[in-house]
Image: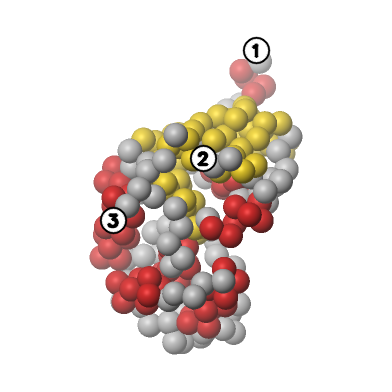
Amino acid sequence: MSVITVSNLTKDYGKNRGIFDLSFEIHKGEVFGYLGPNGAGKTTTIRHLLGFLNADKGECHIGQLNCRTDAEQIQRDLGYLPGEIAFFDDMSGIGYLKFIANMRGMKNFEKMNELISYFELDPSGRIKKMSKGMKQKIGIVSAFMHDPSTLILDEPTSGLDPLMQNKFIELILNEKSKGKTILMSSHSFEEVERTCDRIGIIKKVDLSQSKR
């Protein structure tokens, strides 16, 4: 059964920039690696899945829900880690996590606390004074703490040291064993090789050349 479906998705920014007639499916319980060079369209694809963009053509679904028209319902349950996380810098790390938990209506903080301990994270300090790696850990905890069945992760180990990268890989394998469905955009071939069932590669194509 397909959990994530992208069908003939096109977003044309002009000058051969965007995504064009993109189609793929991700099955239930599968970790899918989404690879490609910078500017190829990985983040644009993810923004469509989150309902942030209107496609010029095609559509995408998560479960039976349309990613554009049902975005609010999808985002209630989806685990999402953006490539560039927008924090409220004056908040503490724990303040931010509780803010996100409150938005999701979370009542059980057990998994959040487990993840904080697992990644050896001290979330008490103010975010603006944290390192890139510390901020990335907060983003990871935020994405996983409500125990979502589907996750979309954009460059999830960016800024993590090798030890924490390995811990993240173990987390993905553990979530996979529970039947979670995960789309993971990554530049790390080791990360993809150790965790993913399948991969999709997107690349830039010069449409002016292809029409000759």
Instruction: Give whichever of 60, 43 is nearer the camera.
Output: 60
* Distance in Å between CA atoms under marks 1 and 2: 34 Å
Rendered residue at 31%/76% (across/down): 117
Nearer the observer, 194 or 116: 116
Residue that mark 1 sits on: 212
Above or below for 123 versus 193 = below
Callout 2 amino acid = Ile
Taking the image as drawn, is residue 195 in sight? yes
**Label placed on residue 174:** 3
Q: CA distance from mark 3 to mark 2?
A: 20 Å
- Tell me where residue 123 appears, x and y as whole percent: 43, 82
122, 61: nearer the viewer = 61
Q: Which mark is residue 62?
A: none
Assess disc 3: are there few (<14), some (14-19) or many (≥20) residues with their C-alpha within 10 Å of its C-alpha: few
Whether residue 27 sits left or right of residue 5 in the image: it is: left
Residue located beneath label 2 in the image = 4
